[in-house]
Image (cartoon, rainbow, N blue to C red):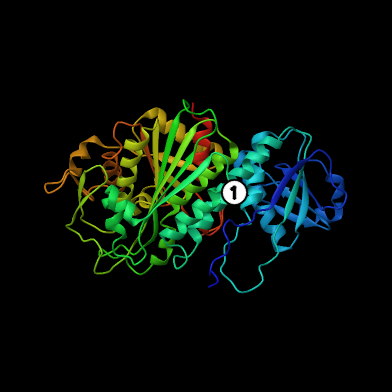
C-alpha cells in the first residue's frame, strides 16, 4: 500500500559557493540598513527602486525585473538567517527555481552560514497531497570572494538535521508508529561509515526489563521499540563519549488520563526529542566529529485500551528502580528513565543529555520559542546555552530546586512519577533520579518543538528545534 506521507528526508535547495557570478542566473543584491547596497547595485533599475524606496530592513525582499534585493538589517546572524528564509519564500511564490546571491566582500563566515541556513529551511514544506507539489527553489549560488565555503557547508548539514527532525515529527501517526520510526533511523544510518544502528523489539525490552517503555506502550496494538545509534570514528577509543537520549512517543492520547480532544492531533510531534537525537547523530557522522556519540530513542505509542497502564500502578524500570504512576499522560519521563539508566550502565558516558517535549508547564513558563534547560553543573548549562546561541536556538536555564527533591519520593515505590508542584521542575527532578553520577542536562522543548506561525527560518508545524544545539554542543565539546 502506498504511504500517505511524503518520502523522508525532504529535499532541500542545493547551496553552493562560487567566486564569480553566473551569467544566466537572476541575481539577488544584498541591502543593509541605510540602505547600504552590496555588489550588483548596477543590476537594479533606478526607476523601479524609486517606487518603493528600499530600507534594507531584515527580510525586505523585492523583485526588480529579473533580479531581486534582500534586506539584512544591521547584519546580526539572526538578521542574515531571517533574510535567507524570507528570500527563499518569496522566490518560491514566484517559482524561481535557481538564482544567485551577490554577497558583500566583507561578509563573515557566521553571516554566510546563517544566510545559507535560512535559505535551506525557510521554504520547507511537509504536506500530504495528491496534487502536484508547487515549484520550489532547486539551487542557490552564493557569490563571494570571502573564504566562507566551509561555514556554508556546515550550515547546510545543520539545516539537513533540522529538516529531518521536522520530517520525522510531521509524519502522521497512522504511518509513524514505533517500528516505522526506528526503521527509518536505521535506514538513514545504513551505509554511513562509522555510524551503526541497532533496533530492539518488545521481546528484547521485556528481557532487559525496560518496564517504563513497556508500560507506556502496553495500551497500543503497535508495540514499542528502542533504537541505539552509535558514532565511532576511527581512532576514537579514548575520545570523550556523549550520550543523547530522545523521547520517542509516536502518538500520545494521554492513556487512561486522556488528553482533551482539542490539540490532540498535534501529538504526532510528541517524538520531536527523539527525532532531534536521530538527526543529530546523522549530522555528527556527516561532519566526522572526532569523538564518540551515542543516540538512544525509546519509542512507544501511549494509547487507551484494556492493556493500558493505570494510575496507581508501580512500574519497575531497567536497573530495578520502581515508579509509582499517578498520571498516565506523564509518559515521557517513564520511557526516558529506562533509556537514561541504560545509557549510564552500558555506556558510562562523559555527559548525558536528554531531549523531550515533556511538560505543558514549560510552555507556560517560557512560551513557544525558548526551550527549558536543567543541568547538574553551571559549566554544562553554559555549554548548551552557548551551542544554542551559535545556531539560532534559545534555551533558558531552569532550577533543580533542592527543597522539592524529597517530593519525588514515594511511599509505595522508590519514586513518584508526578510529585506535584511546578510541573517542569518536578519532571526534571524525577529524571535526575536516573542519571547516576554522570553530568546530565535535560532539555524540555515542549514549547519550541512546534510552531503555529512563520518566523525567521521556522514554518508552521514541527520546527526541528534542538537538533542543531546537540550537534554544535558535540562540535564544541572538549
| Corner quadrant of residue 459 | bottom right
Residue 130: quadrant of the picture? bottom right
Residue at x 50%, y 51% (from the top left corner): 186
Above or below 410: residue 1: below
Query: Is 133 on the left-hand or right-hand side of 178?
Result: right
Q: Is residue 54 visible?
A: no
Mark 1 surroundings: few (<14), some (14-19) or many (≥20) residues within 10 A? many
Left or right of 267 on screen, residue 254: left
The mark tally for this picture is: 1
Percent position of residue 155, x then y? 62, 42
Q: Position of residue 285 (x, y in %)?
A: 56, 40
Seen from the viewer's position, the closer of residues 151 and 107 is 151
Q: Which residue is disc 1 drawn over?
A: 160
Pick the front one: 380 or 325? 325
Residue located at (84% from left, 51% from top): 44
* Residue 426 in sight from this viewpoint: yes
Would you identify the image quadrant in which residue 342 lies? Answer: top left
Q: Residue at x 31, y 37 (%)?
A: 435
Tell whether 27 sits left or right of 211: right
The one nearer the camera, 13 or 340, is 340
Where's residue 260, x and y in %? 32, 67
Viewer-proximal residue among 444 and 307: 307
Residue 72 x, y percent position in the rendering: 68, 44
Q: Secondary structure at mark 1?
A: helix
Amino acid at each position: 500500500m502506498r504511504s500517505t506521507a511524503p518520502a523522508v528526508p525532504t529535499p532541500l535547495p542545493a547551496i553552493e559557493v562560487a567566486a564569480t557570478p553566473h551569467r544566466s542566473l537572476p541575481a539577488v543584491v544584498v541591502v543593509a540598513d541605510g540602505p547600504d547596497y552590496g555588489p550588483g547595485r548596477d543590476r537594479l533599475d533606478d526607476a523601479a527602486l524609486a517606487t518603493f524606496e528600499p530600507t534594507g530592513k531584515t527580510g525586505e525582499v523585492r523583485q526588480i525585473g529579473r533580479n531581486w534585493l534582500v534586506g539584512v538589517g544591521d547584519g546580526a546572524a539572526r538578521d542574515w538567517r531571517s533574510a535567507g528564509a524570507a528570500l527563499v519564500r518569496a522566490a518560491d511564490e514566484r517559482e524561481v527555481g535557481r538564482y544567485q546571491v551577490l554577497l558583500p566582500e566583507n561578509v563573515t563566515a557566521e553571516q554566510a552560514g546563517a544566510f545559507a541556513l535560512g535559505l535551506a529551511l525557510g521554504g520547507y514544506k511537509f504536506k500530504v497531497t495528491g496534487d502536484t507539489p508547487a515549484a520550489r527553489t532547486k539551487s542557490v549560488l552564493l557569490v563571494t570572494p570571502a573564504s566562507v565555503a566551509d561555514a556554508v557547508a556546515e550550515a547546510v548539514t545543520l539545516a539537513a538535521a533540522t529538516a529531518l527532525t521536522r520530517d520525522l515529527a510531521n509524519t502522521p501517526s497512522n504511518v509513524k508508529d514505533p517500528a516505522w520510526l526506528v526503521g527509518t533511523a536505521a535506514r538513514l544510518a545504513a551505509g554511513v561509515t562509522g555510524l551503526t544502528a541497532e533496533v530492539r523489539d518488545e521481546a528484547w525490552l521485556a528481557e532487559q526489563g525496560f518496564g517504563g517503555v513497556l508500560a507506556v506502550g502496553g495500551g497500543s496494538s503497535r508495540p514499542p521499540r528502542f533504537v541505539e545509534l552509535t558514532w565511532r570514528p576511527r581512532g576514537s577509543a579514548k575520545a570523550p563519549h556523549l550520550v543523547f537520549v530522545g523521547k520517542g512517543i509516536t502518538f500520545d492520547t494521554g492513556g487512561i488520563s486522556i488528553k482533551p480532544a482539542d490539540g490532540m492531533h498535534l501529538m504526532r510531534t510528541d517524538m520531536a526529542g527523539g527525532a532531534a537525537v536521530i538527526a543529530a547523530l546523522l549530522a555528527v557522522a556527516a561532519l566526522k566529529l572526532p569523538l564518540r556519540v551515542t543516540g538512544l530513542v525509546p519509542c512507544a505509542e501511549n494509547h487507551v485500551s484494556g492493556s493500558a497502564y493505570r494510575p496507581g500502578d508501580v512500574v519497575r524500570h531497567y536497573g530495578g528502580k520502581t515508579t509509582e504512576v499517578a498520571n498516565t499522560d506523564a509518559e515521557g519521563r517513564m520511557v526516558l528513565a529506562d533509556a537514561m539508566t541504560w545509557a549510564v550502565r552500558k555506556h558510562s558516558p562523559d555527559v548525558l543529555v536528554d531531549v523531550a517535549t515533556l511538560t505543558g508547564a514549560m510552555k507556560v513558563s517560557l512560551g513557544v520559542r525558548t526551550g527549558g534547560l536543567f543541568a547538574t553543573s553551571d559549566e554544562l548549562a553554559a555549554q548548551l546555552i552557548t551551542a544554542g546561541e551559535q545556531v539560532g536556538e534559545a534555551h533558558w536555564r531552569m532550577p533543580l530546586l533542592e527543597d522539592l527533591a524529597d517530593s519525588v519520593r514515594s511511599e509505595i515505590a522508590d519514586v513518584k512519577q508526578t510529585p506535584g508542584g511546578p510541573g517542569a521542575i518536578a519532571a526534571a527532578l524525577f529524571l535526575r533520579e536516573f542519571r547516576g553520577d554522570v553530568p546530565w542536562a535535560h532539555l524540555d522543548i515542549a514549547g519550541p518543538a512546534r510552531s503555529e506561525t512563520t518566523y525567521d527560518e521556522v514554518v508552521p508545524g514541527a520546527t526541528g528545534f534542538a537538533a542543531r544545539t546537540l550537534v554544535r554542543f558535540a562540535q564544541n565539546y572538549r
